[in-house]
Image (spheres, rainbow, N blue to C red):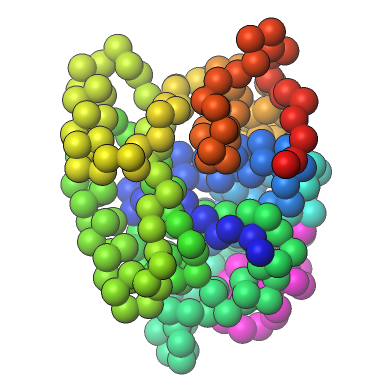
Amino acid sequence: MGKIIAVANQKGGVGKSTTVVNLAAYLGSRGFKVLCIDSDPQGNTTTAFGVKKKSASASTYDILTGKTRIQETIIETDFSNVSIVPATESLAGCEIELINFENRMKRLKMQILTCREDYDYIFIDCPPALGLITINALVACDTIIVPMLAEFFALEGLSQLVNTIKIVKTNYNPSLNIEGIVFTMFDSRLNVANDVVAEVEKYFPDKVFSTKIPRNVRLSEAPSHGKPVMYYDKSSKGAEAYELLGHELLGEPLELPKKKRRGIFSFTKK
């Protein structure tokens, strides 16, 4: 049975899609079967995997509104063991439509239950808002990864997200937990960045990933080429950072091989 992970933060531009794409690609390269569900109307995860939105016959919008089954929307990407449910522009108006549906908080969960056993990991890329689409993701998932910037205002956004998680856990998904908080676009040279990390670790002990994702040009360029960074530039710091984050997610030693080939390494699924 696949583990369902929502990647959420109501603030935009914190690396949610980047985290989904690159964690999924790394896990896929390890032999795990991965499904990504793009529930952000911007469709960044869809684009980053090189999937053309106009060519998609169905999307996340169609499964949320009950127009089609999730199995009919899944597209295999060009990258090992990774499939995607794409997002198209139609998703932008979905929030309004969902208001009129019964079980409007559980529509994504009901769809995922029909394919959960086909995958080892299912990632849900959430929109930068705490609306009905994000609530659907939180109700459907087992755990949440929260990408955030090491900036002062990010603390306020994290507090709002935690309050939402508590509400969802109380009313809809009692097993919901935070998988971890990952700092993105991180610069350890900045005092404020280190102060924010210390503050978050104080209030969320054992919930902050040791891996910090640095600002990296190749990581920023990769989506425009429709590739995860490990396939775009396997020797980049961005590729290595997401590989380390993958190790951490899997509960493995947080290190790369001593005599490493930079980039993609030879591992087998346990």
Quadrant of the frame with the N terminus: bottom right
In this rendering, the count of numbered labels is 0
Instruction: Locate residue 143: give its quadrant.
Output: bottom left
Residue 164 position (above or below residue 29): below
| Magenta region includes residue 66 | yes
Residue 106 position (above or below residue 53): below
Q: Which residues, given as a range, are shown in magenta?
A: 56-75
| Magenta region includes residue 163 | no
Residue 120 lies, in percent from the top left, at 68, 55
Residue 187 lies, in percent from the top left, at 35, 19
Instruction: Tell which of 62 and 37 is nearer to you.
Output: 37
Residue 17 lies, in percent from the top left, at 52, 45
Quadrant of the frame with the C terminus: top right
Q: Is residue 188 left or right of residue 115?
A: left
Residue 103 position (above or below residue 9): below
Instruction: Tell which of 227 and 170 is nearer to you.
Output: 170
Q: Name the residue at 77% across, 25% down.
A: 266
Q: Name the residue at 64% across, 44% down.
A: 24
Instruction: Locate residue 215: give its quadrant.
Output: top left
Instruction: Tell which of 95 and 109 is nearer to you.
Output: 109
Kindly tell me whether residue 189 is visible in this rendering: yes
Kindly tell me whether residue 35 is visible in this rendering: no
Q: Is residue 217 left or right of residue 100?
A: right
Q: Is residue 23 left or right of residue 134?
A: right
Q: Name the residue at 30% across, 12% down.
A: 189
Q: Name the residue at 23% across, 56% down.
A: 160
Residue 115 lies, in percent from the top left, at 70, 70
